[in-house]
Each structure stands twice: as C-alpha cells, then as structure tokens.
Amino acid sequence: MEGILERSVAKVCQPYELEFKAQATASFIKEYWNIEVPVDKSQRRFDMAVYSKERHKVWLIETNYYGGGGSKLKAVAGEFTELSQFVRTSLDDVEFVWVTDGLGWKIAHLPLAEAFGHITNIFNLEMLKDGFLFELFDLD
C-alpha cells in the first residue's frame, strides 16, 4: 500500500509543484518545511507527508490494507481518528488523510463508518485511481 500511495502522490505532486516525503517525522517537517506537527508518539512516522510551499500547508497521510477482519481494524480506526483530532491542534495548516482498503472492511465496517464521522479525508484504492488526490491537493 505504501508503494501504491507513493506512486500516486508523486504523480499528483509534480504538476502542483508540491514536495513530499515518505516516512516523515514531525522533526523533519519542522526542520525542512517549518510546520509544527503535534504528535501522539515521539517517534511517530507518517507514511507520507505532502507540503505546499504556496499555502504553507502539510497533508499527513497514513495507509494500510486489510485482507481479513479482526480487532486490529477497530484499533487502527480508533487510533487514526484520535491522531486526526490531535494534528488539528497545530497552529499551522495541517490536515490528516487516511488511505485504506481491503476486504477486511466489509466485515468491520462499523469502525470505518465511525472514522468517517471524524476524519475528513478517507480514501480507498479506487478513489486514488479516480484522481481524488488531485482534488485534495488542488490549490485553486
């Protein structure tokens, strides 16, 4: 999933002149982009961070794929819901995005439905293919 995400982000970043970093930490984001990202864990690494110099904004993206159900899906949905609320406390323009997919969500659809109530941008693989990241990063 991280490879798919990185290819999708790279494709979108080029025309919009956005910068991106895989496995970005809050300290990297602060040092290179001068944006403060509140983190819940000192060593938190975001699967992808995308930066707009024009808007001085960062999108933090987490991704995963679940082939089967189980308690892990509920835990991850809860963790990312909390994380999205946490990063919103930044004084800078920081937005959380979750890209997830897999048959596991057909079994554990309630935690995902709850997450939709708190996380503004949740995408699946089909949405990436359909260009939703172009809309997300559209700077017009």
Image (tube, helix red, strand yellow):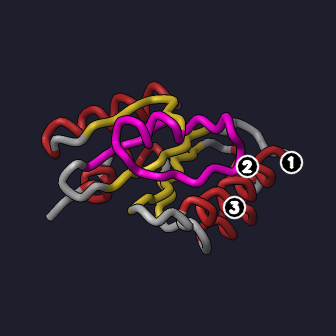
Which sits earlier in the primary sequence, circle 2 or circle 1? 1
Q: Are marks 2 and 3 in contact (CB under 8 Å)?
A: no
Mark 2 and mark 1: span between their CA atoms?
Answer: 9 Å
> Which label's residue is closer to the chain start, 2 or 3?
2
Q: Is residue 35 magenta?
A: yes
Q: Up-down: is 53 above or below 5? A: below
The correct choice, above or below, for 21 with respect to 120 in the image is above
On the image, numbered disc 3 is attached to which residue?
82
For disc 1, the marked residue is 71
Whether residue 127 sits left or right of residue 138 in the image: it is right
Q: Nearer the viewer, residue 127 or 107?
A: 127
Please identify the quadrant where the C terminus is shown: bottom left
> Which sits in the foreground, 93 or 60?
93
Which residue lies under the disc numbered 2? 76
Say what amino acid the circle numbered 1 marks: Ser
Instruction: Decide if residue 127 is on the left or right side of residue 110.
Output: left
Residue sitting at x 42%, y 47%? 126
- Residue 40, compared with residue 92, is above or below; it is above
Query: Which segment did they paint magenta?
Result: 26-52
- Local crowd size for mark 3, using a 10 Å CA cut-off: few (<14), some (14–19), many (≥20): some
Task: Specify the farthest residue to the top.
Answer: 3
Write the residue at 56% across / 67% down. 89
How far apart are the alpha carbons under marks 2 and 3?
Answer: 10 Å
Task: Characterize the local packing of mark 2: few (<14), some (14-19) or many (20 or more) Cα atoms within 10 angstroms.
Answer: some
Q: Residues within 10 Å of mark 1 (few under 14, many from 20)?
A: few
